[in-house]
Image (cartoon, rainbow, N blue to C red):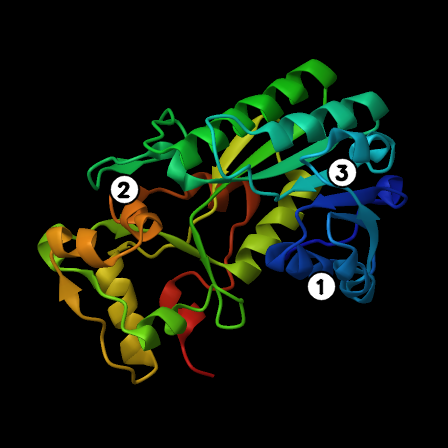
Amino acid sequence: MPLRLLPSPAQRRASLLIVGCGDVGMRVLRLLGGRWHVLAVTSSPDRREALRRAGAQPLLGNLDDPATLGRLGALADRVLHLAPPPAHGHTDSRTAHLLRALARGGRVQHLVYGSTTGVYGDRGGAWIDETDAPRPGSDRARRRVDAERRVRHFGRATGCAVTVLRIPGIYALDREGGDPRERVRRGTPVLRAEDDVFTHHIHADDLARACVRALLAGPAQRVFNVVDRTVMPMGDYFDLVADLWSLPRPPRISREQAQQVLTPASLGFMGESRRIRHDRLQRELLPRLRYPTVREGLAPP
């Protein structure tokens, strides 16, 4: 099914508000190609010109300062919320501030929230899907669970259709901070096979396509795992990156050694293993991925 970017005739005057317009948001703007009226919230005045060039009207606002968000609720029919939660705590005050501002305007008809597959926690490599209840194992994941709860409550309370996208590791060869070759070139070690964990990914372009599709046709109060078809341990993933680009494979170390040399953030990702089904994504939202496996997304041109 081709990705339909134009609204129906009845929706042509609809506008979109992007909150958290980083790399994925910019890819969404490229997909829309100026066909929609798009507004993008930024807390940095320096980003305004880049957003204008990409086709969005920049709005200065800070999710940590509710006083700067007062007018957002009356500006758009659709909202794409990709902003991360705060760095600490169990709750997402930023999402709480945003939803209060949106509720005051009463205009939003559809909200798409970018969450994380980290809400499932460690499942010991077991298969899971969207019917499995979240079991967050970190404060970072607990903040995302809190945000999901808030946006779904917002939908029920206001009649706004809310679609939640649970997102794994995002990669692309042209994504700043998301090009896996950078880690391989640094020689960052990975876990040996007996200690390794299953991990999932999605190409940044396919994630942007899923966002647009969800804004157009995402079912209300529905959750989607936005993952590709690749199922492999983390170490095998980085071995594949190295092999495809003729780079040295990363060294393999034990979990005990990893605790001595890796950052807490890296150790957190290596402490959770799960295999995630994406049947609902393909059946209801995005039947075809441009990069169905990481091999297609990582292959040299």
Mark 1–mark 2 distance (CA, rounded to whole Å): 33 Å
Q: Residue 262 is drawn in which quadrant?
A: bottom left
Quick one: SS at disc 3? strand
Quarter of the image where one finds residue 121: top left
Task: Give the residue pinned by disc 2.
Answer: 274
* Residue lying furthest top: 157
- 42 on left or right of 127: right
Q: Amino acid at mark 3?
A: Arg
Q: Residue at x 67, y 35 (%)?
A: 64
Q: In screen coordinates, is 258 left or right of 288?
A: left
Distance between the alpha carbons at the discs numbered 2 and 3: 32 Å
**Dot 1 corresponds to which residue?**
30
Spatial separation of the CA atoms under disc 1 and disc 3: 17 Å
Label 2 neighbour load within 10 Å: few <14, some 14-19, many 20+: many
Q: Are marks 1 and 2 in contact (CB under 8 Å)?
A: no
Q: Earlier in the sequence, mark 2 or mark 3?
A: 3
The residue drawn where x is 81% and y is 46% is: 60
79 on left or right of 277: right
Reading the image, the residue beneath label 3 is: 78
Give coordinates of residue 79: x percent, y percent.
Answer: 72, 39
Label 3: few (<14), some or many (≥20) within 10 Å? many
Q: Earlier in the sequence, mark 1 or mark 3?
A: 1
Task: Tell me the amino acid under the disc marked 2.
Answer: Arg
**Of marks 1 and 2, which one's residue comes earlier in the chain?**
1
In the rendered view, would you say 273 is above or below 23?
A: above
Residue 27 sits in which quadrant? bottom right
